[in-house]
Image: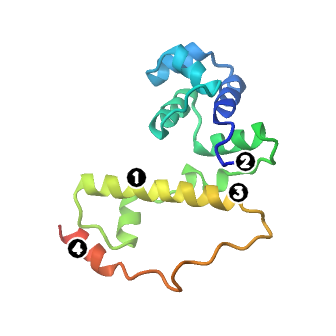
Amino acid sequence: MGEFDGLGRALRYLRTERNLLQKDVAERAGKTKALVSAYETEKTLPTFETVGQILDAMGADRFDLLNALEEVNGRATRDLSAIGEGKRKPQSEVLAALGIEQVSAEEAEVFLRMLDAFLAWFHLIRLQRPADQSPPPLATPHPPNLSSAVAFTATK
């Protein structure tokens, strides 16, 4: 069973848990009611962007979705609040910590979105792994030296 099996059922679960109608979610997300229905019945799969729009329309986030996926697939849900938005550092602190402060606002936004997507993927993989199973070994014993790539990006 894949991580996103039951995505439509999870979206429906979140919607009904919040006492929302398909038409309300569709209107808020800029979609049609028929399309929201098709997503919930898994007749068609939404893009990641569309999932984000639907979650926003329901006042939910990716952590709510992960727990809904666990629920509809009969797996134990987890308290994901510790890795939620409340724990985030200001963007300027993140960029400074990574040594890439000297980038345009557009480059910073793209980088932070990529970092956010990576962290969401990383947490999803960790949550899917049984607690007694260690992580898979890295392909290389040490991470690559990215200082020259970071320096290049920072001077661009």
Q: CA distance from mark 3 to mark 1?
A: 23 Å
Q: Secondary structure at mark 3?
A: helix
Q: Residue at x 67, y 26 (%)?
A: 12
Q: Nearer the viewer, residue 45 or 23?
A: 45
Q: Earlier in the sequence, mark 4 or mark 3?
A: 3
Q: Which residue is mark 1?
A: 113
Q: Type of residue at label 1? A: Arg
Where residue 10 sits in the image (x, y, percent)? 68, 34
Neighbour class for label 4 at 10 Å: few (<14), some, many (≥20)?
A: few
Inspect this view and state whether residue 90 appears: no
Q: To which quarter of the image does residue 132 belong?
A: bottom right
In the image as oriented, which residue stretches furthest toward the bottom? 141
Q: Is residue 116 above or below residue 101?
A: above
User: Real-space Cα distance between discs 1 and 2?
Assistant: 28 Å
Instruction: Please state the horizontal and vertical placement of residue 41, each as a whole percent of the image.
Output: 65, 24
Which amino acid lies under the numbered mark 3 shown in the image of this protein? Answer: Gln
How many angstroms separate mark 4 from mark 3 (CA)? 36 Å
Which of these two is toward me, 63 or 135? 135
Q: Residues within 10 Å of mark 2 (few under 14, many from 20)?
A: few
Q: Secondary structure at mark 1?
A: helix
Gap between marks 1 and 4 measured at Cα: 19 Å
Foreground mark, 1 or 2? 2
Read off the residue under disc 3: 128
Give the mark, 3 or 2, whose residue is nearer the N terminus: 2
* Disc number lying in front (3 or 1): 3
Closer to viewer: mark 3 or mark 2: 2
Badge 3 vs badge 2, beta-carbon distance below 8 Å:
no
Name the residue: 66% across, 51% down: 81
